Amino acid sequence: MVMRRAIRKLRQVVRKIRPPRHPHRLFTPAEEHRIVAAIQHAEHETSGLIRIHVEAHCPGDATARAQAVFSSLGMDEKAERNGVLIYLATRDRKFALVGDEGIHKRVPPAFWDEVRDAMAVDFRQGRFAEGVCHGIAAVANHLKAYFPAAPK
């Protein structure tokens, strides 16, 4: 009887941590709204471009896949080269951040690793939306410093 309860409890914990089967069900509608609001707020203060790409499987290295997605979305076509992509592969539990040449040249060398590590802490605790929002905020701070929004 005690063993059954322990197994049931373990299954409940695993369900909370394990990403959903469908990659687009990673976030609840409220979390999606919060992420979109964070991106809109960041892009309002900067000329930079921030995108999130979620898919189930990542063939090979997450950074290489993120770079391919970055190019396929046309994010490398901006004149200032200041786009940032946050890439998530839910079933493979991989993610990567990719910044275009303009932002990559201006941020400190350890910046991308620091943001990735901060996001990973939230991801390990099952707080995917919070991790993404923290990543957006960190990227937005640097974009705002180096690429402020054009005056209207």
Image: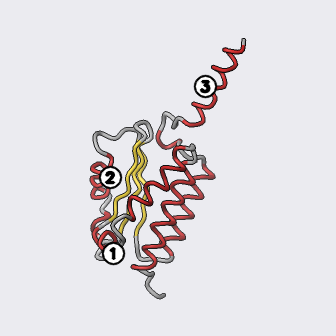
Identify which residue, 62 or 38, lies in the foreground: 62
* In the depicted structure, whether residue 78 falls above or below residue 118: below
Alpha carbons under labels 2 and 3: distance apart: 32 Å
Q: Is residue 127 left or right of residue 148?
A: right
Horizontal and vertical percent position of residue 54: 43, 47
Q: Which residue is mark 1?
A: 106
* Amino acid type, mark 2: Ala
Viewer-nearest of discs 1 and 2:
1
Q: Is residue 62 left or right of residue 150?
A: left
* Amino acid type, mark 1: Arg
The local crowd at label 2, few if under 14, some if 14 to 19, many if 20 or more residues have their Cα within 10 Å, is many
Q: Which residue is mark 2?
A: 66
**Element class at badge 2:** helix
Identify which residue, 115 or 97, lies in the foreground: 115
Viewer-nearest of discs 2 and 3:
3
Horizontal and vertical percent position of residue 124: 52, 44
The local crowd at label 3, few if under 14, some if 14 to 19, many if 20 or more residues have their Cα within 10 Å, is few
Q: Which residue is mark 3?
A: 11
In the picture, the disc for residue 120 is: none
The structure residue drawn at horizontal position 57% and vertical position 43%, both measured from the top left corner, is 126
Horizontal and vertical percent position of residue 118: 49, 56
The local crowd at label 1, few if under 14, some if 14 to 19, many if 20 or more residues have their Cα within 10 Å, is few
Say if mark 2 contacts mark 3, CB within 8 Å. no
**Element class at badge 3:** helix
> In which quadrant of the rendered image does the N terminus lie?
top right
* Amino acid type, mark 3: Arg
* In the depicted structure, whether residue 80 falls above or below residue 132: below
